[in-house]
Image: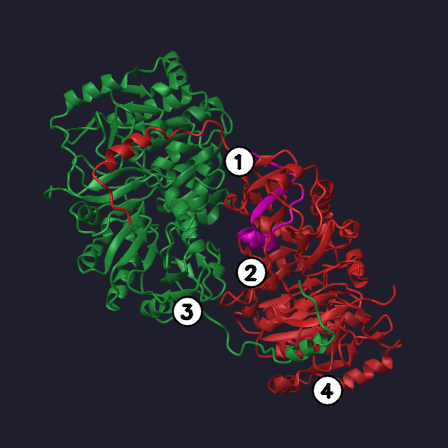
Chain colours: A green, B red
Amino acid sequence: MLHQTETTDRAARQGAGSIRKGAARRTKLLPSLDAAIAACELRDGATVSFHHHLRNGDAVLNMVLDALAARGLKNLHVAATSIFPVHAPLVDHIRAGVVSTLSASFISGPVGEAVSRGLVPEPVVMRTHGGRARALDMGELVVDAAFVAAPAADDLGNISGRAGKTACGTLGYPQTDVEVARHVVAVTDSLVPFPVQPIDISQGKVDFVVAVESIGDPSGIASGTTRPATEPVSLGIGEQAAAVIAASGLLVDGFSFQTGAGGISLATAAAVGREMTRRGVTGSFASGGITGFHVEMLKAGLFRTLMDVQCFDLDAVRSYQSDPRHQAMSAATYAAPHLGGAVVDRVDAVVLGAAEIDLAFNVNVTTKAGGILIGGSGGHADTAAGAQLSIITTRLTAAGFAKLVPEVTTLTTPGTTIDVLVTDQGIAVNPARADLAERLRAADLNVRSIEDLAAEATKAASQPTPPRATGRVVATCEYRDGSITDTVRQMEDAP
Amino acid sequence: MLHQTETTDRAARQGAGSIRKGAARRTKLLPSLDAAIAACELRDGATVSFHHHLRNGDAVLNMVLDALAARGLKNLHVAATSIFPVHAPLVDHIRAGVVSTLSASFISGPVGEAVSRGLVPEPVVMRTHGGRARALDMGELVVDAAFVAAPAADDLGNISGRAGKTACGTLGYPQTDVEVARHVVAVTDSLVPFPVQPIDISQGKVDFVVAVESIGDPSGIASGTTRPATEPVSLGIGEQAAAVIAASGLLVDGFSFQTGAGGISLATAAAVGREMTRRGVTGSFASGGITGFHVEMLKAGLFRTLMDVQCFDLDAVRSYQSDPRHQAMSAATYAAPHLGGAVVDRVDAVVLGAAEIDLAFNVNVTTKAGGILIGGSGGHADTAAGAQLSIITTRLTAAGFAKLVPEVTTLTTPGTTIDVLVTDQGIAVNPARADLAERLRAADLNVRSIEDLAAEATKAASQPTPPRATGRVVATCEYRDGSITDTVRQMEDAP
């Protein structure tokens, strides 16, 4: 504590005379990405992070990597939330040694293929969305510079996901990066007068701002289907999944729900919504990546609020722009396991997909049959662990391959966190959930053993499941707590 | 980086079998403040922080101090944002040795008197709002537990300032504390089902939640005047201050403005608003503590947005509840000097009050004539330093004492950051701003030398300015950067 001497008063008062007002207004605006890279003092081996709110429309990752390459930097670690086909140029940067390390929660497209073929020198670390937030928070993943694709920003670094020509809605993923990154650069194509409105990331978290011609193509946000399935098999699976939820005992006031954006998931949501209406149930929240379909459920009064880490389509963006019940959440709040409870821990029922599921209910959403990297957990393992009722929906076969297999090629989500499998040929309940199996049977649902369904899948498959790759480890699958659930090995030959 | 061995795949997969879903849903809800104090592992000498959004209606500080005292804790440091008359019971806790150290940005009422009389063993550290945020961020002020008065909260710790029976609006001050405090406790009288909506502080920042009967009296929020002055002298000063702004060259599109909640400040705002309307000027933002009067200016289209660290009255609360143009900002975003630019740095004109101002334009808002602690900088020194035009408005005398004096009793805000003094007897311009003096003279404003005005003040005063107290140092006034502008000394005798 301070103990002042007798002479301090006068000295302090004289010192105060030297305080001057700032002559020029400070700004965080820099003229180029190159200037921002210099200001961040990035060196060879630095870790740079990116988010995927612009999904397959994102231009920022490629643009920043080009600028890093132009500065002659090498051996960089790209710590992305997700990599999409649009990020194909990253392959060349890996080949050129600009990037030697990669981590992400989801990798699809040419980069995934390149990883599987052994192009990245270091094993790629695949984390869950919640695990990545934890790793950032705990200092396991140290980011030297986070580059935030900013739909709108002002020159002091306030960022809005709701304004600008490339509005993408919530900014849940960078919200976590900006908390811990050594430097944060907002990259925007809508530099607006101070202060931008409405603010999604506050200026206090941002060091530099760079204005560019375009951060991406907003139509790329709506990659993938965001409408319920309409063809009969998927619709049937959705109806069955909804029937499972209806029979589970969870479909009462306060019900909370998460689905992905796939056709079966949304078909399930549609059927659940009809049942909620029939019963007069008002849910508490729907969470996750949010689609226009979830927005319709909010508007219909089926849920009190939406908890949105990422808008999956432009209808969701418009809702977040205009409806205060549509709330943003950070990746950490959404799914991190170390904060005493995340939103996923309060989800009653989640409907998830699978590339493969096995007899132990383990799920693979990381590789396709044979081992090519085509995805990753994203929030899959997080929600499965958190939800009271985790439902996997899938057909028994796809493209001639069995999807229900003796052992998954890559273990993304442990079967101990999966409660039910719903297929086009019946429902299997995890043996650990005998209570649930009983409820489903009482509701006259077609409950079968997973072994029966697996046998049927094998019979229906026209091609055998390819063996696992046996090359060196090219990726590790980290569970939310940092433990490793599996590894991905290099393909012997191109598929 | 990870280098997997050949045997890792199988080991990891076996390990995955041990992952279990959480059996019971985690909650941060604790049964009592006592339990929260235990959970925070608070010990003798701990630092506990509080915010003042409930102003003179706050019940949380007293309630928590009682609980800390009941646990037998001693020598605590109370790191408050502001202390009001309602916190009188703190005096007893100081007397009993429960609290031995105090820091705040503003102290009024019985605690201020107790400090001036030497009751607190350690010198009290008076910081500016921005300086406190900086000290927290830089680790100079380490908080063991931040107690957040939460108008509404859910059991995972999401906090809303907009919901609940004691809604106080924005939560700018605790937003800064929760970023760095070792533990954060939300104390709420409206515990609602998860998730609370709309969220102002996210669950990821909160460790524990305690429900209590009442966190305070919402009518206490509107302490002090929040309407423009109506009596002629104050109105006249307001008109003159507005004329200074009108003549300054700053009153053009994009104009940004801050005033306090005092009658003269709001009278100035009213006159500025009329001039904006006359000129067809649209401002960018009004900032600070926000009143219903600022809300009216927003609604009238005079400003594009409000940047609100704290709602000063219930009209402001209602506006923040319903109007997305009314934006919240943290104390750090508002006023901190270390983040490359705060909102105060973008204020064009600020209108501030003074207990005393001297010939060097130094301002005292910390003590009243004679030295009793009656306030503190709050955002005074921050906005004066940031704004292009810092205006002090005051009468030449009050209660028989001169307010314009040769040397201020306590130096809160350095005169080098003050541009103009507007009084009921004329306007004095800081000699460093010859450009401004010229503009004001060109506008036929009554510009006089500060020495002339001071002589007039001395003549008009019926009582001499009491000498400074000469006892031990009872408080230090920290500038925003942590340097010390002055000290407050113990009163020799009670006033």
Instruction: State the separation of the CA atoms marked 4 and 2.
Output: 36 Å
Residue range highlighted in magenta = B166-195
Instruction: State the separation of the CA atoms marked 3 and 2.
Output: 20 Å
**Percent x, y of residue A14:** 67, 80
Secondary structure beneath label 3: strand
Which callout, 1 or 2, points at the residue further toward the start of the chain? 1
Select label 4 or label 1 by which is in front. 1
Q: Is residue A171 visible?
A: no
Q: Quadrant of residue A105?
A: top left
Q: Amino acid at mark 3?
A: Leu
Residue at the location (38% across, 20% down)?
Answer: A433
Badge 3 and badge 2 both on one subunit: no
Q: Within 10 Å of the Cα at label 4, are there few (<14), some (14-19), or many (20+) other Cα atoms?
A: some
What chain letter is assigned to the residue under label 1? Answer: B
**Mark 3, residue position:** A29
Secondary structure beneath label 4: loop
**Mark 4, residue position:** B449
Secondary structure beneath label 1: loop
Select label 4 or label 2 by which is in front. 2
Q: Amino acid at mark 1?
A: Phe
Q: Is residue A125 found inside the magenta-colored segment of the image?
A: no
Labels 4 & 2 near each other (Cβ < 8 A): no
Quarter that holds the N terminus of chain A: bottom right
Q: Amino acid at mark 4?
A: Ser
Which callout, 4 or 2, points at the residue further toward the start of the chain? 2
Secondary structure beneath label 2: helix
Badge 4 and badge 1 both on one subunit: yes
> How many numbered tags mark residues here?
4
Labels 1 & 3 near each other (Cβ < 8 A): no
